[in-house]
Image (spheres, helix red, strand yellow):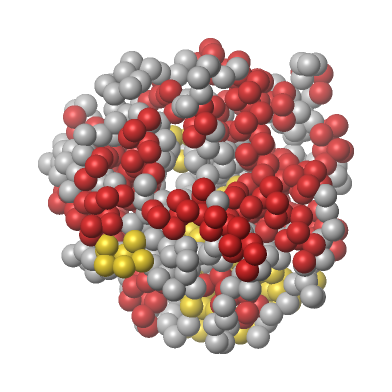
Amino acid sequence: MALADRLLRIDLTTREIVSERIPKSWLRRFIGGKGLAARYLYDELDPGTDPLAPENALLFMLGPLTGKTPGESRYAVVTKSPLTGTFLDSYTGGSFPDSLARALSNHLGILVTGASSDPVTIRIANGEMTIESAEKLWGATVPKTCDELDRAAACIGPAGERLVRYATIASDGGDHHAARGGAGAVMGSKGLKAVVADGGESSENTADEGDDARYRSTDIGRWQAASETVETIDFANEVGVLPTRGWQESSFEGANDLGIDSIRESAVGRERPEDDVSGGFRVDSDEGETVPRGATSISLGAGLGIDDFDAVAVLGSVCDKLGLDLISAGNAVAWTIRAVEEGLLERDIEFGDDESARTLLEEIARRSSPLGNVLAEGIDATAARYGGKELIPTVKGMDLPTYDPRSSPSMALAYTTSDRGACHRRARPVLDEVFATEEWSDDRRAKAVVAEQNLRSFLWCLVVDDFAGEALWKDGGEEWLREVGFERSRDELLRIGERVWTLTRLFNVREGFSREDDVIPPALQQPVRGGLHDGERLENESFARLLSVYYETREWDDKGRPTELLLSRLGLDDVVDSETPVGDETTIRKK
């Protein structure tokens, strides 16, 4: 089987389109997806590049296993984040990835630079790109845009057009979003409304039937088939890590009304009813059909003190329609409510008020009010103007999702060291630590986070379905790659994950990020109220010790910089440029 080994490059300023061969050494060391895109981004961008400037690069990437593994095919969007200023990778599925793979032919992805003076759409077919006018689509919502386009597409809504710094890139009418970090704003800054993949007739996922059956029989496969991610709120509430009413509490009395049982009762079907693992639950709302994910009930439900599932579904549908990351949007609304309670703002809004929340979401996405315009810049920027930095937790400018880490220091470590800002998908040690019968040591916490970060970085080079990748890694990773010509041992594959994680850290270090940015936010240093973990909080001194252990485990110096010995071991010493600070080995404690 021939491997895709080319990249399509387009400059929207000059309209120049080039098909180029990917260096063999890059493919060998970074494979595809996150890794290959990180290598391009590090090579292409000058330090300090404005994420919304034409010089920023926007990559749509596949992996060598796209469509060849169990679960849903996915693609990666990689750029410099306009919300955080860090490296950004975001993933999503739906119909677009498979269609893009067919349309790209022998290419692994596209790299977009420049900016068009007029709105445009990129159309890809048979390994070639064309540019079309998008004047008639500019201003349209995500569902309207997808309806007007005649093929699978990745597009932006009004939030992306107006450069909201947590705007998404959406597919399938808003059912799927590359959400966190604001890739949609980068797309909007380039005048790019949509990327259309004209891949011809759809084909079935070519995953081996044995892999499919094995995945369906795993705990993760059975869980996904039964509940997708919507059961996350039930778990978080049960173990007392559910962020509630703007991160003041860690359990919600209305969680049952937003959990799996309520969603099953409201569902009109499943997203992919033809599959054994049939995707998310589709429900009706006043905004049309929507597919709520776990984050919908957490960020727009418990986070805003709203226990009416129908109201929460509407808020989720509004975000999907406008192209807003619903996690950041929910936290922005929660920050506003708390700021009003603290006397920092005057506005008629409170927890439990879904109508006022909906109005504010519209204002943010369209920047149609002074407050909405400021909130569109992110919570840190808003707090810098009004005060209230301690109200909602953020790391490197990205607000926290899903799990409150005050009872799980390992989860706090995962958030603070995430390469794109606070993220629960890089590592989720909370799932084990909260059930531990004895307190974890700092060494165990650090090793757990490092192991998960490395594994997921490798899986995201393949761009396999997150759940399938995690479930089948122990008996599938090497076999999958062997099928497409990669003969690697398991240790070598994990080293690729470590190499990629280190490269994204180098990118961030070059941008000026350091130990001072890997810190617990003020909101988490305040005690949580009520529930299983009443009064618990994170302390700077103990967390600083944990962070040092993490750096030592990673072979980074005490400032959080990868060292020369590490770069040599990972084969990155020829990658690092002169503008990237490298760590000092003498500051690493010998174990």
Q: As drawn, which residue projects farthest toward the left?
A: 348
Q: Position of residue 148 (x, y in %)?
A: 37, 83
The answer to which quarter of the image holds residue 302 is top left
Residue for point 66% across, 34% down: 450
Q: Nearer the viewer, residue 105 or 166?
A: 105
Tell me if 50 is positioned left or right of 179 in this view.
Answer: right
Query: Up-down: is 141 above or below 83?
Result: below
Q: Nearer the viewer, residue 418 or 434?
A: 434
Instruction: Where is residue 449? Give x, y as percent.
Output: 61, 33
Q: Residue at x 33, y 41 (%)?
A: 234
Residue 280 seen in render: yes
Residue 289, placed above or below residue 222: below
Number of numbered tags placed on the structure image: 0
Q: Residue at x 33, y 15 (%)?
A: 535
Identify the image quadrant of the C terminus. top right
x, y percent for residue 559: 68, 24
Q: Is 480 situated left or right of 428 in this image?
A: right
